[in-house]
Every structure is written in C-alpha cells, then in structure tokens.
Image: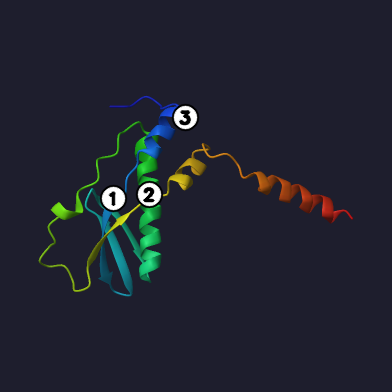
Amino acid sequence: MAKRKLSSAELLRGISALKPYPAVLTPAQGGYEIVFPNFPKLTAYGVKLAQAEQAGVDVLSLHLQGLLTEGHQPPKPSDPERLIPDEDEPLGTTMTMLKPDKKAIKRRLGLEPAERGAAMAATLGRVGKYR
C-alpha cells in the first residue's frame, strides 16, 4: 500500500523523533560485522571497530531515511536489556546503541540549511583567482 508523500515539516518531526537502535558487533574475518535486531536484513562491515560503527551509523541512517520518505513510521528500538544473546555468537561479540545521523539525513533530503561560510568561501576563492 503506497503512502502519501510527507511534507518537510512532517519529515523534520520524524527525523527529530529518531532514537538510537541496538546493534550487534561481531568479529568477522578481517574486521567486524554489524547487524541490527530491529532490521534483520540490514548489515554493515568495517575493518576496524570504529569503521564498523561508522558504517553502521551510515547504513542505519540511510535505512531510516528511506522509511520516512516512503511515509512509514520506523519501528520503536528494541530494549537492549530484553535482547537475548545467541549461544553461537563468536567470542568478542558486543552490543551497542547506534544513533542515526539526523544531520546527514536532513542534509540529504534538502532540509538542512546550507552552511553560511561555505558560499562565502567559494566566492572568495573565485575572487582571489583573478587577482
């Protein structure tokens, strides 16, 4: 069933209401894999832990952005205290809460105002070129 397109104000409200989601980080061959209990098909990977977490934030943010732009309400994040670890999880598996990058979502949707200094710097660069 197709949803109606949300207004900018509705998108902004939806983005501001986004909460952190639990993510399971599992050591994998040559790095770390991230899976989200709330989104079973959503995964990310990174060679280093920090890279994996950033990849997780990026993929989570893009997924939530897609849900919002399609007019769907994202699911409520699972309570990490109620999640039960798998007995087969490799040693070193941990769970963390990843916050969606609200600013990046707003920027990609054209809802974030452009930085004031960026236009000025571009203008100064062109002016300085002709001296």
Callout 2 secondary element: loop
Residue bearing the label numbered 3: 8
Residue designated by label 1: 21
Question: Considering only order in the chain, which callout, 1 or 2, is on the residue closer to the N terminus?
Answer: 1
Where is residue 32 drawn, in percent x and y? 31, 68
Q: On the picture, is 76 further left or further right than 120?
A: left
Expressed as whole percent of the image width and height from the top left, the position of residue 124 reads 78, 50
Q: Residues within 10 Å of mark 3 (few under 14, many from 20)?
A: some
Name above or below for residue 69 compared with residue 84. above
From what the image shows, is residue 58 above or below residue 27? above
Mark 2 — residue? Answer: 100
Instruction: Say which residue appears at 83% left-offset and 55% top-offset.
Output: 129
Sooner in the amino-acid sequence: mark 1 or mark 3: 3
**Labels 1 & 3 near each other (Cβ < 8 A):** no
Q: How many marks?
A: 3
> From the viewer's perspective, is 28 left or right of 66?
left
Residue placed most toward the observer, 40 or 1: 40
User: Which comes before the other along the chain, label 3 or label 2?
Assistant: 3
Name the residue at 12% across, 57% down: 84
Q: Residues within 10 Å of mark 2 (few under 14, many from 20)?
A: many
Tell me the amino acid under the disc marked 2.
Answer: Pro
